[in-house]
Image (cartoon, helix red, strand yellow):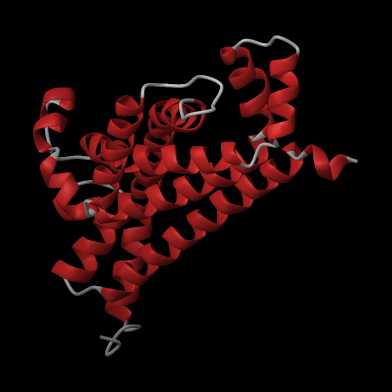
Amino acid sequence: MTDGLFTAESMAELLTAFKTQFPMAIWETFYVTVLSTALSLLIGLPLGVLLVAGEKGGVLPLPKPVLSILNVIINLLRSIPFLILMIMVFPLSRALIGTTVGTTATIVPLVVAAFPFVARLVESSLREVDPNIIEAAQSMGAKPMQIICKVMIPESIPSLLQNVTIALTTILGYSAMSGIIGGGGLGKVAIDYGYYRYKYLVMYAAVILLIILVQIFQSVGTRLALKSDKRLKK
């Protein structure tokens, strides 16, 4: 695989790829990752809240069958490998986007794959909230939605930001795999050049760019989480 990796021809192909392929691929990866994460959070956050607030003894108890169904759906979706899930949601992608191929079409399977993961991360963050704070809010007559919106979520912001960052980097990895079914971004460049055309230098460059993006997302998320942690401001 490394034979002839740094030949003049390979370097020329890499330079051409940086001029013609990588700028759009970086933007597509960023666009798909951020939008998919936002949509996953939009669905996963309420589900994560329900999983905690809706349990027996929670601030907003739900019927046990409803909570069981939610848990089963989340666990089922989380257990399906992403590549298989992408194919399974083709009809949904076609119904919502009008096609199953392309950068925008991959957002649908990314969201379907990610929102159960986000729901579990949100659940984990909310369970870290001190129960005494919730009991204090209840003793002062706060309503369930007030406790959720003004106590539970604000108190778990640092942990939520850390977990959203984990979700973001996970979705970034998923987006790279979507190149197999025609999705755009750096994953498509890596697959097209490395797997189909055996241009490994370009593939390595795409992988390095993916790693750099992960590091950027992780650094920004960690910094935001630290800034929002009130315990570090004392």
Q: Locate the N terminus and report the quarter of the image it occupies.
A: bottom left
Residue 60, percent across and down? 51, 19
View extreme (bottom): residue: 3
- 133 shown above or below 78: above
- Residue reaching furthest right? 234
Please give left or right for residue 72 compared with residue 130 in the image.
left
The image quadrant of residue 130 is top right
Residue 54 visible to the viewer:
yes
Residue 42 to residue 163: above or below: above
Q: Position of residue 129 (x, y in %)?
A: 66, 37
Please name whichever residue, 17 or 49, is drawn nearer the observer in this view of the structure.
49
As displayed, is residue 130 above or below residue 7? above
Say which of 212 and 156 sits in front: 156
Instruction: Assign the C terminus to one quadrant of the image.
Output: top right
Q: Residue at x 23, y 50 (%)?
A: 178
| Percent coordinates x, y for residue 186 in the rendering | 33, 55
The answer to whether any part of residue 182 appears in the image is no
Would residue 102 be found to the left or right of residue 226 on screen? left
Q: Position of residue 187 (x, y in %)?
A: 29, 56
- Taking the spot 54% from the left edge, 26% from the top edge, the residue there is 58
In this orientation, which residue lies closer to the viewer: 56 or 205?
Answer: 56
**Left or right of 213 on screen, residue 193:** left
Total tally of numbered discs in the picture: 0
Q: Is residue 199 above or below residue 71?
A: below
**Which quadrant holds residue 10?**
bottom left
